[in-house]
Image: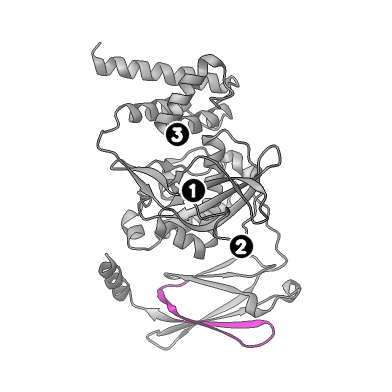
Amino acid sequence: MDADEQTIAQTEALAEFLTQYAQDGGDLDPENAPEEMREILSTIQATLGGEALEILTKAAKGALRDPSTMLNNALTRSAHATDDATTVEITPVPSFTVKTRDASGGKVFVNVCAHDALDVPERGSDQWREGLMPKDVIRALESSSSSSGTAAIDDTRAELRFPLSCADARKDVDASGIEAVVFDCVFNTAVVRHASAFKPLKRYLVELVLDHISAKFALALDPEYRLPQRTFIGARPPPSQKIRVGVPMKLVSPIVQEREAKKVSEKFDERMQYGVEFVNRPVTKVEVRVKVPLRARHGVTPRDVVVSIVREGITLDCKGCASERIDLPFLVEAQSARAKVLDDTTLLVTADYLPYDVAVERCQFRN
């Protein structure tokens, strides 16, 4: 048996041993694990950045079909990692905050941040780098939010795998000056920018960071969460953190079945009604008339409707109403968008048609 074969055999044996340990109820937190397991788990966590512990956590819950193989692949990737990787220090740009609690009732906040050093998703990477969200991502997100989903990690959902960097927990204070636990998670800038305009993507990123933190740090988090109207929680903006570049970033896998029972329930009184009209032939503008339902109008007026425009999609959000997305057959110019209140229940939104070749030229100019 040569050196490579021996390494593979040892890795497979370790993967089988750790998987069985997890399925037998072994504690995956190095600090709480038996003394003989602490060094092994600490080494794996430090080497793989929590990827192996995430796999083991899901294996213990029976969420994976073949955990030993997945763990073996993770260990093998680590063993054959190149020496070309470089560690760089980045300063995350905060975007929004997630608030939840741990098992003891203590406050836990997640600052979701952006930075260009984080890679874009591998699937549709060219479009992401142009600042555009691929259509298959939109379809997958809408499908994910409308289905119960009992599948484990599914390679067919590669479009929903987002590179993510998450620093260790730190102690800070909330808006009231009370001590709280804070995590700083970073995605690519383009991903976070689209999440701010497309609610299904934002909701998905929230679920991803909660799932990732729970698995990586063996931390039980309350699945009920809130989104405070703040870009970050803490006495100061999120501190710098180090990430590895020069090797493929770890791809965060899609949310698996156990989170289906933890989904935040959203109750809406009514649905907004809207009508779309294309102005002129050939089309030069789109008009959308939005009506706020009477039963949802407990102090709500058309001025409370939030309109977000990304590429060929218009998203409507309003308190007491379900979020609505309008898919257009062409791109629209977000900067040209205007809104006008017509009466007590109606809002008129207009946006200019954007030729595809103009959009492409802009992307090429930015690059």
Indicate the amino acid at tag 1: Cys
Residue 282 highlighted magenta (yes or no): no
Indicate the amino acid at tag 2: Gln
Is residue 114 toward the left or the right of residue 361 in the image?
right
Q: Residue 274 placed where, x, y %? A: 59, 77
Indicate the amino acid at tag 3: Glu
N-terminal label among 1 and 2: 1
What kind of element bears circle 2? loop
N-terminal label among 1 and 3: 3
Question: Which region is colored magenta?
Answer: 328-351
Residue on which disc 1 sits? 185
Q: CA distance from mark 1 to mark 2?
A: 17 Å
Front position among marks 1 and 3: 1
Q: Residue 300 placed where, x, y %? A: 71, 75
Quadrant into which the N terminus falls: top left
Identify whether 53 is placed above or below 222: above
Specify the color scheme: one colour
Is residue 28 toward the left or the right of residue 353 in the image?
right
Residue 343 highlighted magenta (yes or no): yes
Q: Residue 272 placed where, x, y %? A: 64, 72
Main secondary-structure element of the magenta-colored stretch: strand
Task: Evaluate if marks 1 and 3 touch, with contact meaning CB atoms under 8 Å apart.
Answer: no
Identify whether 206 is placed above or below 14: below
Q: Which mark is residue 51?
A: 3
Is residue 41 toward the left or the right of residue 340 in the image?
left
| Residue at image coords 59%, 19% | 24
Looking at the image, which is closer to me, 96 or 352? 96
What kind of element bears circle 3? helix
Residue on which disc 2 sits? 229
Q: Quadrant of residue 108?
A: top right
Q: Residues within 10 Å of mark 1 (few under 14, many from 20)?
A: many
